[in-house]
Amino acid sequence: MEHRRDVTCTVILQDHMAEDDTRAWLDAVEHVAAFTAGAPDAQVVCSGVGTITLHREPLPPGTTLFTGAVQCRNGWHRLGRTLLVFDKDWDSSRKPGGVVEGRWSIGVELDPTERWVFPEG
């Protein structure tokens, strides 16, 4: 859209939205860009989750063009699942309550005093 309408967009998101809502917002941005082709000022298109500003003039080098919404997730469960995929090489980890010590097959070096115990089940 930036190339079609000869604009540069700066985007600030404070939250996430559904795909259909995103498409509608981007359609509105395209509409504003099409109908303000001669406008010298920047045009701002707001939604419930952020703003997109359309600039006709070049922006200064180093201008932030996209600021995304923060995502807060607990990634430990996913990391644990990923690490368990690599446990096929660990004979001791194949048994309930098994313990892995030392070097892991994925190249992670454990402190010799650390022990990871895999729970039963």
Image (cartoon, rainbow, N blue to C red):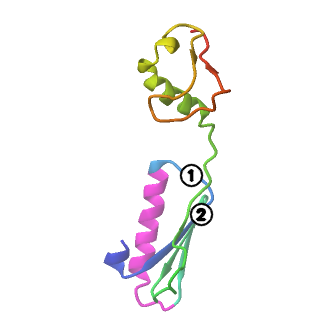
Say which residue label 1 marks: 16
Tell me residue 105's x, y (percent).
Answer: 44, 28
Residue 13 highlighted magenta (yes or no): no
Circle 1/circle 2 CB separation < 8 Å: no
Task: Calculate the distance from the C-alpha at mark 1 to the C-alpha at mark 2.
Answer: 9 Å
Dividing the image into 4 quarters, which one contains the N terminus?
bottom left
Exactly how many numbered labels are in the figure? 2
* Rendered position, 113 above or below 5: above
Query: Which residue appears at 49% of the width and 23% of the height?
Result: 84
| Front-lying residue, 50 or 35 | 50
Where residue 9 appears, as percent x and y from the top left, is 47, 75
Residue with the mark numbered 2? 50
Residue type marked 2: Gly
Few, some or many C-alpha atoms within 10 Å of disc 1 (few <14, some 14-19, many ≥20)?
some
Q: Is residue 34 left or right of residue 50?
A: left
Q: Which region shows up in magenta?
A: 20-40
Residue lying farthest to the right in this orientation: 113
Question: Looking at the picture, does residue 91 appear above or below residue 38?
Answer: above
Viewer-side residue, 75 vs 69: 75
Horizontally, residue 96 falls left or right of residue 87, namely right
The chief SS type of the magenta part is helix
At label 2, counting other C-alpha atoms closer than 10 Å, the crowd grade (few under 14, some 14-19, many 20 or more) is: some
